[in-house]
Amino acid sequence: MEDFSHLLQATLTLVALISGAGLLLLSMTNRYNHALDRIRHLLKEKQATPEADWRKVDLSIEIIYGRCKMMSKAILCVSSSIASSGAMVFATALEGLGGLDLGWLKALLLMLSIELVVASILFVIEVGYSLRAITLEIEPGMPADRTLVTG
C-alpha cells in the first residue's frame, strides 16, 4: 500500500502540471478565437467601406492574422507539452506498477515538456502584435510599430 501511495503522489504532481498548462492553453485558445472573430468582422466591415479606406482595414487584418499564426504555434507548443507530461504520468505508472526503471525516459519527457512551455513564449510576442493592431484603431495614421506609453 505504501508503494501505491508513493506512485499516486508522483503521478498527482504531474497531473497538477498538466492542469496548469491546460489553463494556459484555455487562455490561448480564447485569444485565438477572439482574433479569428475580429478578422471575420473586419472582412465584413471592408465590404461596407469605400475602397479608398481599405488599406487601414487590410493592415488590421494582416496584423491580426500574424497574431493568429503566432498563437497557433504557441498553442501547439503547450498542447505538445501537455502530451509529454501525460506520457510522463504513464511512464511513472508503468515504472511503479511494473517495477521498471524508466528514469531516463521520464527525464527526457520532463525536459521536452519544459522546453515546449518555454517555446510558448510566442504567446507573449502575440501580445505585442495585439498592441500594434489596437494602435491602428486608436490613432488613425499612427505608425503600427510605434509604442504607446501610458501614464
Image (tube, helix red, strand yellow):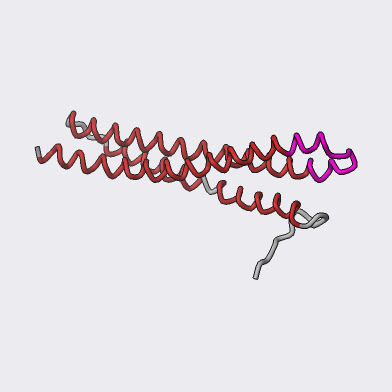
Report x, y in % for residue 25.
Answer: 47, 41
* 41 relative to 137, above or below: above
Q: Quadrant of the N terminus?
A: top left
* 84 relative to 134, above or below: above
Q: Quadrant of the C terminus?
A: bottom right
**Nearer to us in this view, 7 or 27:** 27
Residue at 50% over, 39% down: 77
Report x, y in % for residue 57.
Answer: 79, 42
**Nearer to us in this view, 17 or 61:** 61
Tell which residue pokes out farthest to the left in this image: 1
Occupied quadrant, residue 3: top left
Residue at 26% over, 36% down: 92
Q: How many marks?
A: 0
Tell which residue pokes out farthest to the front in this image: 48
Residue at 51% over, 45% down: 119
Report x, y in % for residue 135.
Answer: 73, 55
User: Viewed as shown, does residue 112 lie left or right of 62?
Assistant: left
User: Viewed as shown, does residue 26 lie left or right of 85?
Assistant: right
**Nearer to us in this view, 48 or 64:** 48
Occupied quadrant, residue 103: top left
Asked whether 146 falls inside the magenta stretch, the response is: no
Q: Main secondary structure of the magenta part?
A: helix
Residue at 69% over, 38% down: 39
Tell which residue pokes out farthest to the right in this image: 52
Report x, y in % for residue 80.
Answer: 45, 35
Tell which residue pokes out farthest to the top in this image: 98
**Nearer to us in this view, 93 or 124:** 124
Magenta range is 42-57
